[in-house]
Amino acid sequence: MGYYHGCAIILLLLFTGCSLHSIPDNYVLQKGGESIVIGQLILPTTGMPYLERPYRGSDGSFSFSTILGRDSRVYSVVPDQHGVVCAFYIAVPQGRYSIDRISWGEFKSDVNGIFTVYEPGKVYYIGSIKMTVPERDPGQIAAHIVMDIFANRRSVPVNYTVIDDLKQVSAAFRKKYPHLPQTIEKSLVVFRDPYQ
């Protein structure tokens, strides 16, 4: 019974999704294989005086899924965190992808961001995704957090913008991975209203 249960869990993970961290320093990009997607997640301040980090921890992450491509997966990305700027260098197959959720502690929201990996064996920059907390009274934000904690939602609405910071991000990529292709193509995320 334990063997079959373990196999079922492994199959479920293979067919539904995976967690991605940045590629290792010695990663080798295969011709005709995956491409590398690079970018940044820029975390917001909470918008509340004396509370610069989220109540539920300060890890930033985002998830995206395949819209069109060889596989049909949901990816969960855990970027390398350096203060409020989280860099990511991940390997994915050719395809079109939808960023579904971005989170940072209790700051999270469903989003609709689209990006494309056009060809295998290349490096694509999808942008620096900046999270900002809408301007509100600190008391309103604190009340929202408390209500969501009691409702077990733990979310605070956040706005997103894409900044084209290719020069800085590509310089960091080239320094970390000098053996990988140095030509980086842009495929910036386009955010749409998630309710359309």
Image (cartoon, rainbow, N blue to C red):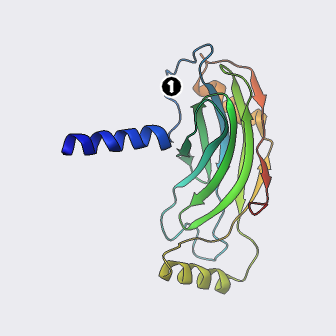
Residue 60 x/y as whole percent: 56, 54
Q: Position of residue 90 (x, y in %)?
A: 58, 34
**Quadrant of the frame with the C terminus:** bottom right
Coordinates of residue 192 in the picture (x, y in percent): 80, 55
On screen, residue 88 above or below 160:
above
- Point 50% across, 71% down: residue: 55
**SS label for mark 1:** loop
Relative to 23, does residue 73 appear above or below in the rendering?
below
Q: In which quarter of the image is residue 89?
A: top right
Residue that appears at 68% across and 32% down: 95
Classify the position of the N terminus by image quarter. top left
Which residue has dot 1 on it? Answer: 25
Residue type, label 1: Asp
The outermost residue toward the left is 1
Residue shown at 57% from the left, 73% from the top: 51
Which quarter of the picture shows residue 36? top right
Can residue 184 be seen at all in this image of the molecule? yes
